[in-house]
Each structure stands twice: as C-alpha cells, then as structure tokens.
Amino acid sequence: MSYPTLFTTPGVRQFAEDVDTERQAQLAKWGDQHHPDGTGYDGSNMHADFWRQRCQDAFADGEGTWGHVLLEEVFEAIAEQDPATLRAELIQVAAVCAAWIADLDSRGA
C-alpha cells in the first residue's frame, strides 16, 4: 500500500521531525504547558510597524537578512489579539523558520 507524501516542500519533513523531537523533549522536561498569550499589549502594534518597516528598508538597501524577516513576523504575531489571526501569524513564523533552516542546510551548515 502506498501512502501520499505528507510534505511536498523540500526540507519541511526534516523540519517537522526536528520540531517534533524538540517538542517531545519539552514535554518530557516541563509537561503540557498552558500560559497566557501575552500579545496585543500597549505598543505592540508600534513594535510590529517598526520591524515591518525595518525589514522593508533593509531589503530596499540590499541588506535584508533572515533575522529581519523573522523579527517582522514575530512582532506581527505579538501584536495580534484575535486567536485565529494569532495562529495564522505563528504559522508564518514557523514557515520563516523552516525557510531559514532550509537555507542553512543548503549551505552545508
């Protein structure tokens, strides 16, 4: 019996397996955790706007980095109060992490 491929983007399967391994270690160490989101605080939109502009400026100047992209996505997530939108932003954070890791792996790091 043949099963469909779960991941089609190169590197995502390994990324997911590595994340799963880390989650298992976290669960073993701390158990299942539940914390407040801590998002949508006063000034969080200002921080998101700053990193969004900083990222755009860095790439416009030819100096953009993965760090710029990740911080933009993280601060966009931190600014969110709506759980569904927060989840979507966190997926974007994870996708940027996957892309950055794929880039590192492609360099033989």
Image: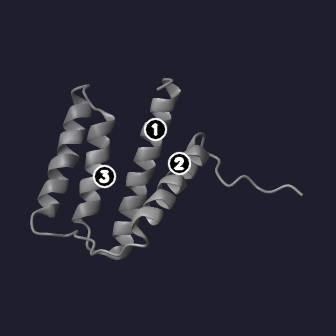
Q: Is residue 52 above or below residue 40?
A: above
Is mark 2 in CB contact (under 8 Å) with mark 1? yes
Q: Quadrant of residue 83?
A: bottom left
In the picture, the disc for residue 73 is 3
In depth, the one of 62 and 100 nearer the eye is 100
Identify the mark nearer the N-term, 3 or 2: 2
Q: Is residue 10 above or below residue 31?
A: above
Is mark 3 in CB contact (under 8 Å) with mark 2? no
* Residue in view at x 57 percent, y 40 percent: 11
Q: Mark 2 is on which residue type?
A: Asp
Q: Mark 3 is on which residue type?
A: Glu
Query: Cα distance, mark 1 to mark 3?
Result: 16 Å
* Residue in view at x 26 percent, y 47 percent: 71
Helix, strand or loop at mark 3: helix
* Residue in view at x 12 percent, y 58 percent: 46
Identify the mark nearer the N-term, 2 or 1: 2
Q: Position of residue 15 (x, y in %)?
A: 53, 46
Query: Cα distance, mark 3 to mark 2?
Result: 21 Å
Q: Which residue is under mark 2?
A: 18
Q: Is residue 41 left or right of residue 2?
A: left
Q: Position of residue 66 (x, y in %)?
A: 33, 37
Identify the mark nearer the N-term, 1 or 3: 3
Helix, strand or loop at mark 1: helix
Q: Is residue 16 above or below residue 55?
A: below
Q: Which residue is under mark 1?
A: 101
Please tell me how crowded label 1 is: few (under 14), some (14-19), or many (20+) other residues with Cα within 10 Å. Answer: some
Q: Mark 1 is on which residue type?
A: Ile
Q: Quadrant of residue 14?
A: top right
Q: Is residue 100 left or right of residue 106?
A: left
